[in-house]
Amino acid sequence: MKDLLKDYGTAILDTRDFFSQSFVEKYKKTIIEARKEFKLKLDVCTATLPYNDGCPAWTSTFIEYMNERLDKDYSYLYTGSYFHKDTDKWWPQIDHNFTMDCFEYFEKNNMDVNTLTNEDIPSLSSLSQGFYHQCAFDFAYPKKAVEDYLLMNDEINIKMMKSMVTKELTYEVGEWIANDINNNSYKVTRDDGYEDFVDQGKWKNEKRHKHLNVFYEKSFMPLHTDDQDDPNVSFICQNYPNIDRTIEDGSLFRYFIDEEPFDVLTNYTTHIIFDVNKGAGDIPHLVTKNNTDKVRYSSYEVYRD
């Protein structure tokens, strides 16, 4: 059987193996406070239309497929609300309401969402775009407990990455924080007056990028890989600001080696580090259905050279 670290450059690590008990306890307390901030921010940004948070949907195939099956008209999603600098185009975004209605549809039709793939539902994997939230981090301008949480993630991730490689890593704690919250140099305006900020305006030259994946009850992330088109991406780190989740709660990180599944419980002491240069982008994985009303979060943090 292939080895997770040797063949896929992926390590599943525990905070307690790298830091003192006092650090871990402080980390837990910080997460409890950060989760309160996440909820306050998400309650606002998920209700805002047009939706301007998260990643673009590179195809509208899934939106069109589900729009024919849902009781509401989601044709407004076809209008691009995300400006992507590299393609110089406006792209649609899958919003919170649409995503939650999809989960209700799957539930109502007794579909085994843990096994669904793009072969079952066209472009199902694009559903994942509805989980990505940058507003919970105030984009590149986090405050209070959220900033404390992300800075502690930096400490953890950098130390863990260094344990996996022999080359020198020059990442620094907090180097991603943008200084000028009023900088409009990256603002773009659609023909109808709608405004967005391109990625480089949200994050400091995109050397470091962070977003929050949010899994509400009944949500899941279908099978996919994290292969990267960007040659500058070196590491992807997944941090989990969750307390006391159980196997029965679901929302497990499930990866496959030679088609054999392995499940990971995603509480705050667990961290998954992907070394992209060693094949981490090739490992198939998914997130199983969240069986409870406890929101499951994961902080997706990208480290570029």
Image (tube, helix red, strand yellow):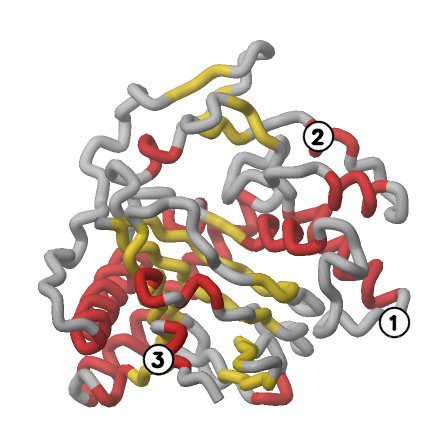
Q: Quadrant of residue 184?
A: top left
Dot 1 or dot 3: first in sequence order is: 3
Category of crowding for the residue at label 3, using alpha-carbon neighbours closer than 10 angstroms: few (below 14), some (14–19), many (at least 20)? some
Q: Element under label 1?
A: loop
112 relative position to 83: left or right: right
Query: Mark 2 touching mark 1, by CB under 8 A?
Result: no
96, 238: nearer the viewer? 238
* Whole-number angstrom distance, CA of label 3 to CA of label 2: 40 Å
Q: Residue at x 54, y 15 (%)?
A: 190
Q: Residue at x 25, y 45 (%)?
A: 207
264, 226: nearer the viewer? 226
139 relative position to 25: left or right: right
290, 128: nearer the viewer? 128
Kindly identify which residue carries mark 3: 5
Kindly identify which residue carries mark 2: 78
Q: What type is the residue that disc 3 sits on?
A: Leu
Dot 3 or dot 2: first in sequence order is: 3
Kindly identify which residue carries mark 1: 110
Q: What type is the residue that disc 1 sits on?
A: Asn
Residue 215 x %, y %:
58, 64
* Whole-number angstrom distance, CA of label 2 to CA of label 1: 28 Å
